[in-house]
């Protein structure tokens, strides 16, 4: 039900729960809080990592595939946290996990050839191509496939880090719908 000023009470931060809440608007000078936050951020960035060397990063095998993370929301010791950046290797004849997400991911094909299925439509690519996953309000479903049975595919992926602003679901859901074969083999 709408209140007298037209706001939906369920969405207003001060009335969104029946539990008593601290009202920081009454406890803090919020402009001074911005200055405090700025100073803390400057201090953090002063000693943060700005050169990330791929040969020093570990590879992980997760549900989406073999990945090497350069920038990730959980890594807070880097100069910039505005993007997520990683490499993904897909073994010969294999595929990534199948994922539902909001799109807005750009992949550069460093090595190999294959195709990506986006919402049921197959899109072929090869080394030197850019895969630009579309943004859709309801999200997209995508999966990468390596078309070469012998050689691996290597992709570099980059997307805006909106996890603090929108949450990991980014308003449309974030789900791994199918695990990559290598992960399935280790986690039956």
Image: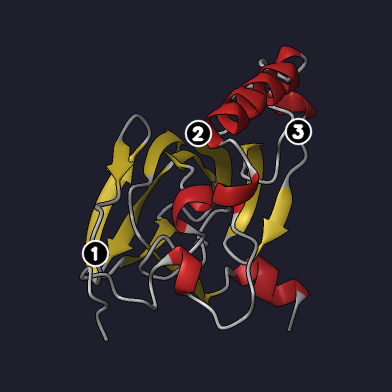
Disc 1 residue crowd, few under 14, some 14–19, many 20+, Cα 10 Å: few
The residue that label 3 is drawn on is 57
Q: Which numbered disc, 3 or 1, marks the residue that appears first in the sequence?
A: 3
Between the residue at mark 2 and the residue at mark 3, the CA separation in whole angstroms equals: 20 Å
Which element type, helix, strand or loop, lies under badge 2?
loop
The residue that label 1 is drawn on is 137
Q: Residue at x 53, y 49 (%)?
A: 164
How far from the left and from the top, in percent, is residue 170? 41, 60
Q: Which numbered disc, 1 or 2, marks the residue that appears first in the sequence?
A: 2
Between the residue at mark 3 and the residue at mark 1, the CA separation in whole angstroms equals: 34 Å
Q: Which residue is drawn at 62% across and 44% down?
A: 73
Q: Residue at x 57, y 39 (%)?
A: 86
Q: Nearer the viewer, residue 119 or 10?
A: 10
Disc 2 residue crowd, few under 14, some 14–19, many 20+, Cα 10 Å: some
Quarter of the image where one finds residue 76 = top right
Question: Is residue 125 shown above or below 66?
Answer: above
**Horizontally, is 132 left or right of 23 in the view?**
left
**Horizontally, is 131 left or right of 176 in the view?**
left
The residue that label 2 is drawn on is 82
Q: Which residue is drawn at 77% across and 73% down?
A: 186
Q: Which of 176 and 183 is in front in this view?
A: 176
Q: Which numbered disc, 2 or 3, marks the residue that appears first in the sequence?
A: 3
Q: How many badges with numbers are in the image?
A: 3
Q: By what rule are the colours in the image chosen? A: secondary structure
């Amino acid at each position: 039900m709408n209140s007298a000023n037209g706001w939906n009470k369920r969405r207003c931060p001060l009335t969104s729960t029946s539990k008593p809440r601290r009202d920081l608007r009454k406890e803090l000078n919020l402009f001074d809080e911005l200055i405090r936050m700025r100073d803390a951020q400057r201090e953090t960035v002063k000693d943060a990592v700005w050169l990330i060397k791929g040969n020093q990063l570990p590879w992980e095998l997760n549900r989406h595939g073999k990945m090497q993370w350069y920038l990730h929301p959980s890594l807070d010791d880097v100069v910039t946290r505005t993007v997520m950046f990683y490499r993904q290797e897909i073994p010969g004849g294999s595929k990534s996990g199948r994922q539902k997400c909001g799109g807005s991911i750009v992949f550069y094909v460093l090595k190999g050839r294959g195709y990506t299925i986006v919402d049921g439509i197959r899109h072929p690519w090869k080394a030197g191509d850019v895969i630009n996953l579309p943004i859709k309000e309801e999200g997209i479903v995508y999966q990468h496939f390596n078309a070469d049975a012998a050689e691996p595919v290597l992709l570099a992926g980059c997307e805006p880090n909106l996890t603090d602003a929108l949450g990991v679901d980014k308003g449309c859901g974030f789900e791994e719908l199918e695990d990559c074969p290598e992960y399935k083999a280790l986690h039956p």
